[in-house]
Amino acid sequence: MSTVASIEDQYTSGVYRKRDLTIVRGEGALLWDEAGNQYIDCVGGQGAANLGHAHPKITEAISQQAQKLISCPEMFHNDQRAELLQKLIGVAPTGIERAFLCNSGTEAIEAAMKFARLATGRTEIVAAMRGFHGRTMGALSATWNKKIREPFHPLVPGITHTPYNNLEKLETKLTENTAALILEIVQGEGGVHLGTEEFLKGAQQLCNERGVLLIVDEIQTGFGRTGKMFTVEHYGIQADILCLAKSMAGGVPMGAVLLGERVGQLPVGAHGSTFGGNPLACSASLATLETLKAENLIAHAAEMGDYLISELQKIESPLIREVRGLGLIVGIELKQKVAPYIASLTTKGVLALPAGLNVLRLLPPLVITKAQVDQIVEALSETLTQEAV
């Protein structure tokens, strides 16, 4: 174990399961450890590194803004915040009118649930099985994984779960007490499961008919990850509340809750955030939006995602049950636990994520090249064929 790792392990909280790897530098879709070994990053900051690492437009924006103003709470107006809000609503799906800015995905979910209760006067929330929405108490209550939920009971009351892609069951769940339905279009942590068009459009219709607000969690899939700016665009779904974070500011912590007309006017003082919408994060987010457009990265993500999925589907391995995904969020469901194969990939210069016990998840930066995709496929092919046990 390196000196850096031993120091970190001595003083950190202990709540993170750490890999035996010390990352010290990144550029584009690549990372380097302290020994100088190079890796293609398919962890992608768990979805936060859509623009890759050390993108010059992001580093320049951060540097320039840091010399002007870093902190400015929303009790004051600010130039960077105003410009970001205007541009964010400009790229948002139809029907989105306003935004609340925060610092992370779980904060966005907490705010969304509060806003839904305020707007409807109702108290209950319905979430989907296999869904993951965060680890703070409200977001955790909407998250399905019992392993991370149960140690913290009692959770927030009034939050129940329904099977994903099952419209018949959903009809029985949405009642006169339901404030909101919260869904991921692609269930990332839950195994990279995609919603069907029938289910998603049916869910929106049910919400509209029953006075329920539709909260869509695009924390991992927003800002080009799936080959559209937002995944709802693939299905023509109109969210009442859209939750964003992760890659929103090029790797700088930031989140947002986009609000549609059905939410109505929120009371002054109903919610707040000390660091939410700070000028530094806003500047980085503006640079992110500009870079996505200038470098045509959303179309590139669609192209590279289609290519990656098609190449992975060609791998003939007894381990593979299914390859699925949308754009550059890809899951490879195995017939065995993925942990040893993720470790083996690391030795071949590819960093990957699990999504549950038996799904290997890939979240490469949108800046990834075709040559790098070929390297990923080659490493996976070797790992899942030569090392099949």
Image: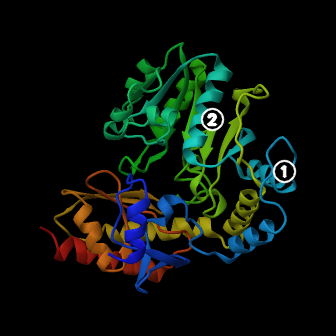
The reply to whether residue 76 is visible in this rendering is yes
Q: How many C-alpha atoms fall within 10 Å of the one at disc 1: few (<14), some, or many (≥20)?
A: some
Q: How is colour applied across the structure in the image? A: rainbow
Assign a secondary structure to mark 1. helix
Where does the image place residue 223, in percent across and percent down from the top left? 61, 57
Where does the image place residue 301, in percent across and percent down from the top left? 54, 67
Q: Which mark is residue 82?
A: 1
* Circle 1: residue type: Ala
Q: Residue furthest top?
A: 176
Depth check, front residue: 110 or 292: 110
Assign a secondary structure to mark 2. helix
Where does the image place residue 112, in percent across and percent down from the top left? 61, 34
Q: How many C-alpha atoms fall within 10 Å of the one at disc 2: few (<14), some, or many (≥20)?
A: many
Q: Which mark is residue 263?
A: none
Residue under numbered circle 2: 111
Q: Residue at x 70, y 69 (%)?
A: 291
Pointer 2 or 1: first along the chain: 1
Q: Judge left or right: residue 380 versus residue 157.
A: left
How far is disc 2 from disc 1 in space, using C-alphas? 20 Å
Residue 311's quadrant in the figure? bottom left
Q: Residue at x 71, y 58 (%)?
A: 281
Quadrant for the C terminus, please.
Answer: bottom left
The relative height of residue 274 versus residue 221 in the rendered view (above or below) is: above
The reply to whether residue 327 is visible in this rendering is no
The relative height of residue 368 versus residue 149 in the rendered view (above or below) is: below
